[in-house]
Image (spheres, rainbow, N blue to C red):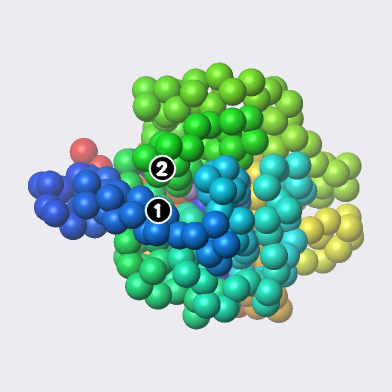
Amino acid sequence: MTERVTTPITMPGPHLAAGSGASRGAQDGAGPTVAEWADAVAAVRNLRPDSTVLLACHVNPDGDALGSMLGFALGLRRLGLRGGRASFPGPLEIPEPFRGLPGLDLLVPAAQAPRDPELVFCFDAASEGRLGELADRLGPTTIVLDHHASNTRFGGIHLVDPSAAATSVVAEQLLARLGVPLDREIAECLYVALATDTGSFRFDLTTPATHEFAARLLATGIRPGEISRRVFESRPFGAVRLYGDVLRRAELEPASAAGHGLVWTYATLDDLARHGQRPYVLEALIDSVRAADEADVACVVKQLGEAEWAVSLRSKGAVDVARVAVALGGGGHRLAAGFTGHGSVADVLTAIRRELDGRAGEDQG
Ligand SMILES: [Mn+2]
């Protein structure tokens, strides 16, 4: 997978099927093994109060990356560990929806992330490339917490559970094993992570276990209405106008994807500049586009540079968009995938239509 892929912040599709219980655990779709949990707990127990610990999450962090990292970082603080610092690659810019998260005071810019930490935790990153300039801090003492079936197991201890709705599920399980009770601050971080990755509990990965986890988080007294408003339902007025411009140019192609239909639109850097907006405000655009009933496949093409585009693909079920994304150098899940496109918008759409028409429907039934 490329690292420039617009990683879907939501994970609606079923992950890879569980394997036959092989001891390597998550690689086969099962969760972490008993030994992996024990190794992770022992690594934390070996720390001294002033041990330097780095917590890292993926570039362009979403709610799950930031929420699971900060929630866990707060948990380490509750254990009396004072040397925890959290970071992510790129500029230290927190997307507006996450600026109220507890634990932000633990964040440092990547350049100031500790050089030789005793322990490193990685959150929601499927490969080390997603950690950018922080990748050089990784080593045998790295504990990887993730829920991507495609995780490349780049650390020393791997807590990877593809059946988990969010990385925060894994983070909470480790906190529980460390004896850290949930409090309001930790719960708010983990709740934001869970709500983000499940699309507010709408997607298929939302299981009874997901709601049981949410219930434990809510029992701490956090306010889901207030959190949802802040995270999902508020954006600058300029972004409202920007959505208007971008949605007005949406196109519906009922014959595309072998008749399953394609709806698409695009947003340029000029669109952002005209409305004075940052790229993150477009994160939810795909949800507005995919609402179009007549198309199984939805696509948003967002400009990254002169001839470079971040492409998000969604399917309602008839088409495997991961196959399209992988064929075009990206990756993702059956119902949510992405890749980096090159050339003009027309070039990108031509490539997508070709893959959709060639492959759509092949694996149905
Ligand atoms: Mn995630």
Point out residue 120 in the picture as x, y percentages from the top left corner. Answer: 47, 65
Point out residue 150 in the picture as x, y percentages from the top left corner. Answer: 33, 59
- Could you tell whether 198 is left or right of 41 in the image? right
Looking at this view, is 246 or 117 the one in front?
Answer: 117
> Which residue position is annotated with label 2?
178
- Could you tell whether 135 is left or right of 270 in the image? left
Q: Residues within 10 Å of mark 2 (few under 14, many from 20)?
A: some
Looking at the rendering, in which quadrant would you find the C terminus? Answer: top left
Mark 1 and mark 2 residues within 8 Å of each other at the beta carbon: yes
Looking at this view, is 354 or 276 the one in front?
Answer: 276
Q: Earlier in the sequence, mark 1 or mark 2?
A: 1
Q: Secondary structure at mark 1?
A: helix
Q: Is mark 1 within 8 Å of ligand 1?
A: no
> Which residue position is annotated with label 1?
45
- Could you tell whether 13 is left or right of 196 in the image? left
Point out residue 284 in the picture as x, y percentages from the top left corner. Answer: 65, 44
Q: Disc 1 marks which amino acid?
A: Arg
Query: Residue at left 32%, top 41%?
Result: 163
Point out residue 214 in the picture as x, y percentages from the top left corner. Answer: 50, 26
